[in-house]
Amino acid sequence: MIDTSGLPAPADAPPPRSCVRIERPEPGLAVIVLDPPHRTLAVLDLPLLRDLDLALDEIEQDASLRGLVVTGRTPTSFAAGADLDALAAITDPALVARVIGIGHAVFDRIAGLRRRPSPLRTIAAVGGPVPGGAYELALACGTIVATESRETKIGLPETQLGILPAWGGTTRLPRRVGVPLALEAILSGKLYPAREAFRKGLVDRLAFAEDLLRIASDLAMGRARVKKRGRGWKALLVDKNPLVAGFVANRARAQVIARTHGHYPAPLAALAIAARAPRTSTAASFAAESREASALAVSPVCKNLIGIFQASEAAKKLGRGPDGRARRAPERAGVLGAGVMGRAIASLLAERGVWTRLFDVVPAALDVALVEHRAAARERVARRRAEPRDAVAAIDRLDVTRTLAGFARCGVVVEAVAEKLDVKRGVFAEIARQVGPGAILATNTSSLSVDAIAEGVPFPERVVGMHFFNPVKKMPLVEVVRGRRTSPDAVSACAGLAVHLGKTPVVVADVAGFLVNRLLGPYLDESLRMFAGGVDAQRIDRALEAFGMPMGPLRLLDEVGFDIATHAAASLHEAYGPRMTPTGVLEPLVRAGRLGKKTGKGFYDHKGTSRGGRAEIAGDLSRFAGADGARVPALSDEEIVDRAVLAMLNEAARALEEEVTAGPQELDLATVFGMGFPPFRGGILHYADAVGVHAIVERLLRIAAAPDVVARPGGRERFVPADSLVAMAKNLRRFHP
Amino acid sequence: MPRTPIVLAAGLRTPWCRAGGAFAREDSGHLGALVGRELLARSDVDPAALDEVIAGCVGAAHDQANVARVIGLRAGVPRGVPARTVARNCASGMEAVTSAAASIEAGRGDLYLCIGVEVMSAYPLIVGERMTRFYARLSSARSPLARVAAIASFRPSMLAPRVALMEGLTDPISGLIMGKTAEILAREFGISREDADKFALESHQRAKRARDSGRFAREILPVLPLDARGARGGEPHAVENDDSIRDEQSLPALAKLRPYFEKPDGRVTVGNSCGITDGACALLVASEDRARALGLAPIARIVSWAYSGCDPERMGLGPVYSSARALDDAGLALADMETIEINEAFAAQVLACAKAFASDAFAQNELHRGKALGVLDMERTNRNGGAIALGHPVGATGARLLLTTAHELAARKQRYGLATACIGGGQGAAVVLERMDA
């Protein structure tokens, strides 16, 4: 029996032998069913590993057995992988190494059954989500059969959580499918749908749910066979050849570094082990897995990534109905306004199977919406992300109308018309007359109050903010804005819709800028002030990119558009007073019609970048620097980052005081998904904890005392530490436990 | 007259577009579903309340068998609502409506989504019979030698395709293409080339007036065609109007055209015939009670309808036979019809019908009645032009004739209207409509 003493286990761990069932449907065949009573979906936690180990005792001693099937409760529920809660709690690398050792040992016993004097055929019969540890368990079996179902998703996502597949996955996958494909799977962390997993050799056979166990049993008893697709000459030429494998690994390494800027150590560690795995003994490769993973698992990067993952999983639960199950998306939806946001929202809805009706008074805007939507649908087919019939269905599901009529059967109507209160109220008043009881009116406003927009709607409890980010299809966050009179049910319905659209919802209060734009305000303005004060524009961007932001603040302004940014800054100033005072540095540019990417030029020159080239910094920026405000003293890169990030952090502390989000976890999630705050830092409040609130307060005070900041006519207040920060610093408290 | 009052509760159509033009990349499923969906949304009818979807279509794509079902599901009609496709050649769109009416009368249901649709652009080229046999030989050749022998039997002439469009427009019984049946009528009824051209010109001028006055705006749904591309790199635009109306049409221009079907002395040219066209039209057909209960504002009541057969070689006279029966059924006379929509397959054919309507001899010999039906008043007929200017998407036209007649009655506050069409193969279709609050 394995020793689990001192290792983290769930509080409700059941007694031994209760998590795994052995069935013997016919002589010579044993079926191991993962069936832990304390989990709705089996998790490879310590109780389960312990019982799997006990089950193997029995299997190993039974010489009459010819075949073994390992499967889950149902054909579409196998196991969810390792116990993330436990992993998040472990801080001692030695303990991690012990947990890894247990997995290695148990899985290797299964692999060993094939090699015993009377060998067993071992078949993994899997389906539904088969991520990480669950797939590593399957990899230990001789043959893998997977359920052909939309629910089936197979892969090794560990590197996305800052660790690596350390229960033999990094070792066994390259041996099964070859180094290049294994690297793709491990480094991307992609979960492959059943067909693709079969095509790529991640599994050996597909079976319909109803046939899964029968086919697995036939395979286990030798009544049926699968054609094993070896790598053939490629195994010798590529996987076993140090030169070629090294070349492949080097290319992958360069790609990883380009993508992560070196902030994420896990993919690099996994890469090194996987590339060598076909040429290394199992024991040595397992040792490397264990060594690397136990160091990674206790690192802050891993903890932060797991934290964000868990926060996003928790956020998705917001969208569940009163029965605890995911809400069904409305059958029909309306979108008002075919601008950039409206048409992207409409296209996304249609793509996700909702009959969508898009309104705009400008016929050309509707034409563009349809052209973009159809092109996107065909693009997905061309990239093999969808079948042709999916594209046809998506195209059928978007209709356009030039009159504000025909919305009566819509379960939700999302408004994305001009950011003018009377226009928004006008369209909602009309829609409110049409829709049936239960319909929800959502506004995609970014600068107006949901309460103000709900004014005049006879059912304000069903008016919600649904703030998507641009570009809608790429940005993973939706701020669900709870107005003063919005009902919890309407909030939950919008969160559910966001989840249906593949987004992560965060519920925020109806305050100016909501959360993300409110935090971006001081961050962008501070960056502009540094630019105006003489700091090189490219240096500002590079410093924040090195910090981990996906793009520097000035490049972000180019994307947003100077007109929109100026407008947003003004409304924040109006709402929050002096600390949001905007610098005027963008004004001459806006006047000159230089608005950023959409006009071809902003801080960067975007001409000729339509084919994916990266825009170069514009050559004439010095004309605009120094136009406003005092000269900024020479700043180090750290000081540049501090000014931009701490201005935002201080505002985040205020937002948390005001309970704009439910708590620090949600706030962090919004910063990561909404503005791309570096995931490895775990969100802005995690960053505050990592630096130490005390140090944050000191640095804020130092910046507030800087001569150029003191000399500002307005905006110095953003560096005056928020009350809660001061209190926390005094009591040595943290945002996160 | 139907025992249950039956109404056209609402209707809508796409623009009629020249084949190979704006809708060249369309398919019946998409176009039919598009207009059906919009009609349901605008009329706020719960699709689940429909008793059936009925589509009229002559040449549905080979990959859209029972195109009505394809249209229903793609229009967002729940899967529990059945669908059937009906065909009566050029009157298929009308057949969709009248078979809904027949079902309502029989008490089988009281709410139907009826579609007429035709994408003639999509009519395929067919591999010829000799080529088909060649493929068969090739696939049944077992030995390499037999395969070589099979390949050797190939002749380049086998590649000549059969054109589904031309063959579809040819009556297999008489062996005549439709244009030739019009030539027969022109000769027998003494229709001159000049008369035919004048009629064609009038059709274009009336259609132009109707378009410019916004007369069609209430029945046309602007459509951004699939695969729409802007002209010369410009932005693509939704098609808002029927696109084969020739504003600059003139008698000299028409006179220049050579006879298409019978050279050199024929009178039928492409200028005085209907065009090959794509389009779709949707109508909600309901019992009057049901329409009222749903809060709809019906546009017209169906008073009577009739189909009748005639000589396939003189199929163009079909409207005379069927109108006689429909009018008798309604207890009305041709003179009571204040609006008449007759499909303009060919100018010569419509003019021949006009003569037959007014002829006592024709009435006695062909219709077995003592006196002529009456004069087909051209001022009341096709006031907004007809198929010569607008085009004739065969399966869709019948539905449009009904929609246009209903709107015309409403706009002019008239009581009775007649929609009628000739049908390839030797038939006629006629429906008498009545304005709702007349």
Image: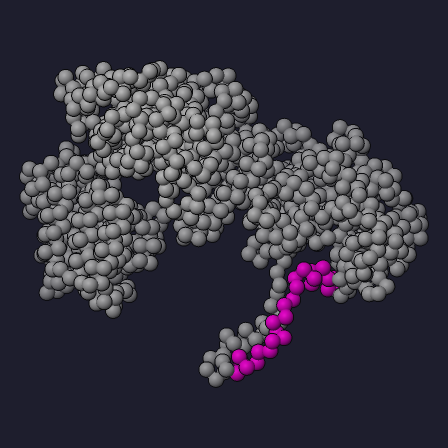
Left or right placement of residue A169 versus residue B93 in this view: left
Left or right placement of residue A155 versus residue A378 in this view: left
- Answer with the quarter of the image where residue B382 lies: top right
Question: What residue is drawn where x is 47% and y is 52%?
Answer: A388
Left or right placement of residue A579 versus residue A369 in this view: left
Number of marks in the rendered image: 0
User: From where the camera sits, is residue A475 visible?
Assistant: no
Left or right placement of residue A427 versus residue B321 in this view: left
Q: Please tell me whether residue A711 belongs to the stretch shown in magenta.
A: no
Protein image colouring: one colour
- Quadrant in which the C terminus of chain A is drawn: top left
A361 relative to A203, above or below: above
What x and y, as percent, mark residue A718? 28, 19
- Which residue is farthest front? A623
User: In the depicted view, which residue is nearer to us: B413 or A285?
Assistant: A285
Question: What residue is drawn where x is 37% and y is 34%?
Answer: A621
What x and y, as percent, mark residue A456? 50, 16
User: In the depicted view, which residue is nearer to us: A40 or A721?
Assistant: A721
Question: What residue is drawn where x is 81% and y is 61%?
Answer: B259
What x and y, as percent, mark residue A475? 37, 37
User: From where the camera sits, is residue A572 visible?
Assistant: yes
A658 relative to B288, above or below: above
Q: Which residues are magenta?
A: B149-173
User: In the depicted view, which residue is nearer to us: A552 or B432?
Assistant: A552
Question: What residue is drawn where x is 36% and y is 39%?
Answer: A617
User: In the depicted view, which residue is nearer to us: A102 or A710?
Assistant: A710
Q: Please tell me whether residue B165 belongs to the stretch shown in magenta.
A: yes
What x and y, as percent, mark residue A21? 18, 47
- Answer with the quarter of the image where residue B410 lies: top right
- Answer with the quarter of the image where residue A713 lies: top left
